[in-house]
Image: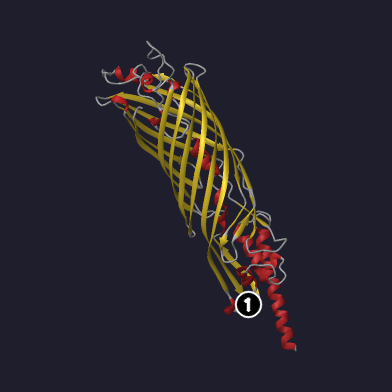
């Protein structure tokens, strides 16, 4: 009897010690107990035969979670891979900037007869796709400042059409594509990944007057990637964007946009937990993929203003803009996960960004056509998107009143920059091949590179 009593006291002491350790880990973390890294929360809930779940034995649990909780004399657990589960909202600030972009473009529009150096350079700046693509524009205007600068070198303008010849009653059509690399570093709150984004956009615009152009575009993109901790993901995005381009003065412009995007997220992450027992042979390892299919809606709006000043063949000017997005991610539940798959509540994310930058371009005439080189740099600051509490439960917690818990995602980078450079060759008869490259700089969480290339043929 004394031996049995001693063994019971030993088991009670071991449970008390393990509970104290779990409590200490939570209390000494830099955030409160209801806002930990997901893996820490899972550890605490599974410790001591899932005592953190407030379970009555294993009643009301699915078979996998019940099996984990039934491991004899469970003293604790170690889990991993959970940080990947917040992927859907992790790139809001980044993709917001990528989607709306810098709203810069080479726009060669008819400026009227007899004008040359004094024409509004701002009328040639606009890109609703966020990436340089002359596909959205008319042909080279032989009366434009770019062309006037290039012909000063002695080149002929024979064979080039004005933009008015490439439009039908002020109507224009465009299409462009993009390729991007978006990689995330591993942090305490988020698993790292490598991803590639492929996108395509097409649309139409209409010249309402000499100072106003309005239009709309549709776009599609796919983001596919691999978790560094194991697993894959794929996001399909479908959306539209309406815009208006206004020229208040000869050298200034204002750009207004508004749009909507529908996202479908497919995520397959590796969920792992090692459940430790006082009896070594009763140790249990969970190593299973948890998959989910969820949807999100993104509404966006932006205002960009700029000033352009010509210096011979060069044009340079400042830019300032404000970008806002509202992202809603619907509730969803993961399949699989070996008992530690998660079910999520609704999520709403607001992002408000400001951007300040400088744009420059120059043009050279060659015997093949006019070559336009553009460079830009801007600084981005995020105001509204903060570290969030994400509400979840285990999908196999099937009780009428399941235990819900929260974890924190990564706080987005507040400040970073973008730099870009591009080339457009305006050829005779409306052919316009182009290439552009953009890089994100100064973001401690992400690395992002984007490129576009293609050719435009006048309709």
Which image quadrant for residue 14? bottom right
- The 10 Å Cα crowd at callout 1, few under 14, some 14 to 19, many 20 or more, is some
Q: Residue furthest left?
A: 367
Tell me: residue 140, above or below residue 263: above
8 or 249: which is nearer to us?
249
**How are the colours assigned in the image?**
secondary structure
The spot of residue 292 in percent (x, y) is 55, 56
333 relative to 153 in the view: left or right = right
- Residue at horizontal 71%, vertical 75%? 13
Tell me: residue 238, above or below residue 209: below
- Residue at horizontal 70%, vertical 72%? 57
270 or 163: which is nearer to us?
163
Q: Secondary structure at mark 1?
A: loop
Q: Quadrant of the N terminus?
A: bottom right
The spot of residue 261 in percent (x, y) is 54, 40
The spot of residue 339 in percent (x, y) is 60, 66
Q: Which residue is mark 1?
A: 278
């Amino acid at each position: 009897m004394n031996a049995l009593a001693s063994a019971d006291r030993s088991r009670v002491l071991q449970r008390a010690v393990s509970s104290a350790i779990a409590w200490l880990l939570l209390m000494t973390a830099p955030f409160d107990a209801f806002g930990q890294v997901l893996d820490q929360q899972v550890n605490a809930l599974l410790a001591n035969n899932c005592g953190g779940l407030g379970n009555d034995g294993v009643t009301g649990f699915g078979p996998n979670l019940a099996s984990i909780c039934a491991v004899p004399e469970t003293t604790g657990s170690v889990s991993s891979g959970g940080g990947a589960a917040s992927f859907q909202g992790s790139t809001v600030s980044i993709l917001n900037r990528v989607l709306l972009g810098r709203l810069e473009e080479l726009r060669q529009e008819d400026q009227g007869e007899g004008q040359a150096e004094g024409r509004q350079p701002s009328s040639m700046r606009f890109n609703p796709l966020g990436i340089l693509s002359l596909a959205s524009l008319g042909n080279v205007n032989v009366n434009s400042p770019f062309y006037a600068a290039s012909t000063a070198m002695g080149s002929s303008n024979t064979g080039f059409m004005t933009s008015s010849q490439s439009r039908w009653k002020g109507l224009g059509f465009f299409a462009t594509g993009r390729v991007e690399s978006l990689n995330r570093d591993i942090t305490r709150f988020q698993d790292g990944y490598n991803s590639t984004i492929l996108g395509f956009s097409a649309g139409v615009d209409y010249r309402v007057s000499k100072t106003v152009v309005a239009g709309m575009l549709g776009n599609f993109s796919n983001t596919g990637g691999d978790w560094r901790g194991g697993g894959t993901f794929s996001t399909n995005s479908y959306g539209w964007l309406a815009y208006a381009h206004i020229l208040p003065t000869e050298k200034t412009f204002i750009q207004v946009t508004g749009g909507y995007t529908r996202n479908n997220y497919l995520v397959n992450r590796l969920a792992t937990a090692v459940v430790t027992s006082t009896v070594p042979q009763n140790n249990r390892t969970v190593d299973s993929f948890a998959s989910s299919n969820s949807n999100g809606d993104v509404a966006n709006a932006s205002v960009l203003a700029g000033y352009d000043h010509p210096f011979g063949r060069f044009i340079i000017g400042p830019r300032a803009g404000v970008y806002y997005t509202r992202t809603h991610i619907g509730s969803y539940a993961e399949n699989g996960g070996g008992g530690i798959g998660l079910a999520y509540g609704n999520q709403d994310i607001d992002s408000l960004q400001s951007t300040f930058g400088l744009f420059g371009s120059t043009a050279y005439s060659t015997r093949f056509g006019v070559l336009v080189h553009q460079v830009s740099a801007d600084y981005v600051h995020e105001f509204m998107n903060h570290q969030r509490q994400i509400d979840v439960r285990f999908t196999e917690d099937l009780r009428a009143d399941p235990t819900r818990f929260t974890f924190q995602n990564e706080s987005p980078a507040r400040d970073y920059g973008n730099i870009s450079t591009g080339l457009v060759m305006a050829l005779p008869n409306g052919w316009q091949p182009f290439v552009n490259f953009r890089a994100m700089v100064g973001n401690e969480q992400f690395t992002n590179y984007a490129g576009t290339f293609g050719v435009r043929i006048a309709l």
